[in-house]
Amino acid sequence: MNASTTLHAVHMECKADPALRRRLWSYAIAAGHVEVSGMGEIDVLGPVITLLDNMMMIKQHGSAGNTHLDIQALADALDTKYRSGADPNRYRFWYHTHLGEVYFSGQDDFTIRDLSRNMPLLVAGVFNRNGRTHWCVVRDAVIVAEWDFEIPGPRPSKDEFEEARRT
């Protein structure tokens, strides 16, 4: 995904390595009949946002039909990153899976608003087991770009699936 989009007179490019995209697709498959969620690291250089292959799973509450991110678990994970010398301000990519269609649900909208209150820049993405994705970039609590993307290539292999299950 090298999605380049212009919205609200803001030009930006959001890049992710193909291996990272496949890993996110594998998470959606490995999750089975529940949703998973996590935060990833980004790098920003001018209008280019690069998603880095440094992600962490975050606890969620709920069921397949109504799931929400555990904000305290996120705060604890970011504190752990900080204590290990990492910059927690670089974790601005919220990813999660849906069982069916990819869109930001009402709960997702709430999570995006909640996260973006404390993050001047946030990238959010939702993935399903068919390789379909939906994305947005939020700058200063305003969605400045939103798009769909289908991950190219064959369905993740058994090895990729097993690696995702171990995560």
Image (tube, helix red, strand yellow):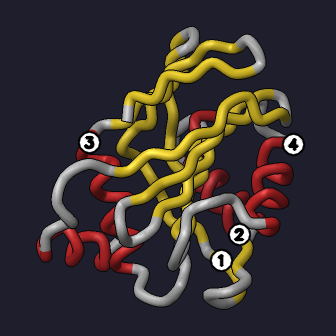
Tell me if residue 88 can be seen. no
Q: Earlier in the sequence, mark 1 or mark 4?
A: 1
| Kind of residue at disc 1 | Gln
Q: Tags 2 and 1 in contact by the CB under 8 Å rule?
A: yes
User: Dot 1: few (<14), some (14–19), or many (≥20) neighbours within 10 Å?
Assistant: some
Q: Earlier in the sequence, mark 3 or mark 1?
A: 3
Q: Earlier in the sequence, mark 2 or mark 1?
A: 1
Say which element carries label 1. Answer: strand
- At 68% from the left edge and 38% from the top edge, which residue is drawn? 122
Q: In the rendered image of this protein, does residue 103 appear above or below residue 61?
A: above
Q: Which mark is residue 18?
A: 3
Quarter of the figure that contains the N terminus: top left
Q: CA distance from mark 3 to mark 4?
A: 30 Å
Q: CA distance from mark 2 to mark 1?
A: 5 Å
Q: Tags 1 and 4 in contact by the CB under 8 Å rule?
A: no
Q: Which residue is mark 1?
A: 60
**Which of the pair 58/76 is nearer the observer?**
58
Q: In the rendered image of this protein, does residue 103 appear above or below residue 70?
A: above
Say which element carries label 2. Answer: strand
Q: Which residue is mark 4?
A: 117
> In front: mark 3 or mark 2?
3
User: Dot 3: few (<14), some (14–19), or many (≥20) neighbours within 10 Å?
Assistant: some
Q: Which residue is mark 2?
A: 69
Say which element carries label 3. Answer: helix
